[in-house]
Image (spheres, grey):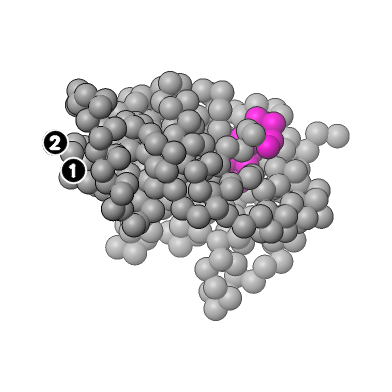
Amino acid sequence: MSGAVRTAPIASTRYDDFLRERLREQTEPVQHYRLDDQQVWIKRAGVPHARWPFWLLGLLARAVRLPLLAPVPNPGGRASIDTEARRLRDLALRGLRVPPVLAQQPDGFLMGHLGTAGQPTPSLAEEMNENVRDGRPQAVLPLFRHGLDAIARVHRAGTCLSQAFARNLVRCPDGVVGYVDFEDDPQAALPLAQCQARDILCYAHSAAVYLLEAGALDAARAPWAAWLAQQPPSVQALVAQAIRRMGWLRRLPTDRRWGRDLQRARAAWSLLAEGPARENP
């Protein structure tokens, strides 16, 4: 139940013309439209990004001796449009569920909707948060495991995501988890094993807080450990190295008064520290 989303056979010139016309007037970075019987999205180029935040992140990665935390270049503007369209095409060719690129110009591209027009494709983050809020905590752990399986599919395909947060993993109407947001390409800056370890850490950081709020963090440790144990030894070693060098996270306060970001980091540490991987000597 994976693969690219199929679209109606509209002539490619129709897509090109539609993109050209809408780009002239679109002011939002991303906006959806109806094109005949399809729901489509246009992503337009924004302003180029400043470079100094990447420099600061690079200093942090070197300070804690974790290359996989090094910033991935994302210059924004036309370069990010080109990167995202290229990555979406590559992932689709690998049989992964991503929005299809229908047309592209230097200032933006047109992509299809993940799923059926008019039907929602909520992110795993949205679904986990909603289930916690509405008193259905038992649904959070299965959603967390869906995310693990979705990341594993990407890694088995020989690639990685860009930002493997739970908000970028979306559930299509047929139940398949798809992938969005590819403005940067980690493999342009890091070896594949580091990119895949980065995916794992990003997902744990974004999803563990929902497990905590659902009272499912303890129950998640066994499936998490079993899943991590199936990853390539090189990736396991990198995750274990990161866990060791981020041990200071266990000292973060658990009190909610300190804010959700600290709670998110502390929950991620609690999940990660129970994993089976160990740094190779």
Q: Quadrant of the C terminus?
A: top right
Type of amino acid under label 2:
Asp
- Tell me if residue 139 can be seen: no
Marks 1 and 2: CB-CB under 8 Å? yes
Q: Residue at x 48, y 31 (%)?
A: 86
Left/right of residue 198 with respect to residue 108 in the rendered view: right
Left/right of residue 255 with respect to residue 179 in the rendered view: right
Location of residue 71 in the rendering, given as x and y in whole percent from the top left corner? 67, 48
Q: Nearer the viewer, residue 23 or 68?
A: 23
- Tell me if residue 53 can be seen: yes
Circle 2 SS class? loop
* The magenta stretch spans residue 137: no
Q: Residue at x 47, y 25 (%)?
A: 90
Location of residue 8 in the rendering, given as x and y in whole percent from the top left corner? 19, 26
Identity of the residue furthest to the left in this view = 36
Q: Residues within 10 Å of mark 1 (few under 14, many from 20)?
A: few
Return the residue at label 1.
34
Left/right of residue 159 with respect to residue 137 in the rendered view: right
Return the residue at label 2.
37
Location of residue 81 in the rendering, given as x and y in whole percent from the top left corner? 47, 41
Q: Nearer the viewer, residue 89 or 205?
A: 89
Spatial separation of the CA atoms under disc 1 and disc 2: 7 Å
* The magenta stretch spans residue 201: yes
Against 158, residue 166 (above or below) is below
Type of amino acid under label 1:
Arg
Q: Which residues are magenta?
A: 189-202
**Numbered tag placed on residue 101 in the rendering:** none
